[in-house]
Image: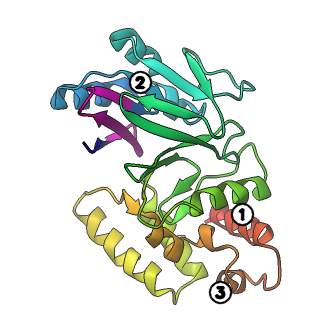
Amino acid sequence: MAADIRLFPCLTDNFGYLIHNPATKATASIDAPEAGPIVKALEHEGWRLTDILITHHHGDHVGGVAELKQKYGARVVGPHDKTTKIANVDHRVGQGDVVKVGGLLARVLETPGHTLDHISYVFDLEKALFAADTLFSIGCGRVFEGTYPMMWDSLLKLRALPDDFKLYCGHEYTAANVKFALTVEPENAALKARAEEVARLRAANKPTVPTLLGDEKKANVFLRADEPSVAAGVRMKGRSAAEVFGELRERKNKS
């Protein structure tokens, strides 16, 4: 039986996610930006929270953990990197580890760059990638703690996943990401089509995720730093992909 995934807004522009295994009734929250919307979503579905899968230590991803753990007694899974302490973690995981949510299996990828402890969760059978703040639709996270080559390597790990996987990211940033990407690849047909789609979705107050990884590979300039057209768009023809990526991120920081 396929998993049920629910998406809902949290805080200002975060996404909250619940993934539910109907066979075992297990339910995980991917991160916990704030408790209220997560509790509301659980009660609406009639689900009970069994697990909280944390991607990284930033407050807008762990702010609701303590309250949810107290209310439901949920197991809290977090990155094994202990350089930044995350409270209430019961189980720590790293690259290649598998987390069970009832009958569902989530494979862990270490995706540092935005933070050093960042991990992503891949539900292979469900074809679902929860990438939090490493990969956004038509964007990527700011590189706060890592380096640009480190972040590029993390993006390559995610890009290697199949095209038919759905990307569930941490924030609703797609419209701003599209605006920037068009300055780099204004003639990219896939990007222009995505821009039109995003404009329609936001005008209707609908979320722009999930999105297919295959579509992101065609339109997301940050996943395309090794494409000649992207290097040309930032006047870095012949430079390494990591260098092009760094220039893209620097420009986006200032946009």
**Magenta segment range?**
8-28
Q: Earlier in the sequence, mark 1 or mark 2?
A: 2
Give the spatial CA distance, label 3 vs label 2: 43 Å
Q: Quadrant of the C terminus?
A: bottom right
Q: How is the image coloured?
A: rainbow
Q: Nearer the viewer, residue 15 or 81?
A: 81
Q: Which mark is residue 194?
A: none
Return the residue found at the far right.
Answer: 239
Residue at figure coordinates x 64%, y 52% from the top left:
142
Q: Which mark is residue 51?
A: 2
| Magenta stretch contains residue 37 | no
Identified by mark 2, the residue type is Asp
Q: Which mark is residue 250?
A: 1
Query: Residue under circle 3?
Result: 229
Identified by mark 1, the residue type is Glu
Q: Secondary structure at mark 1?
A: helix
Q: Nearer the viewer, residue 226 or 197?
A: 226
Q: Nearer the viewer, residue 49 or 204?
A: 49
In-image side of 175 versus 244 (left or right): left
Q: Main secondary structure of the magenta part?
A: strand
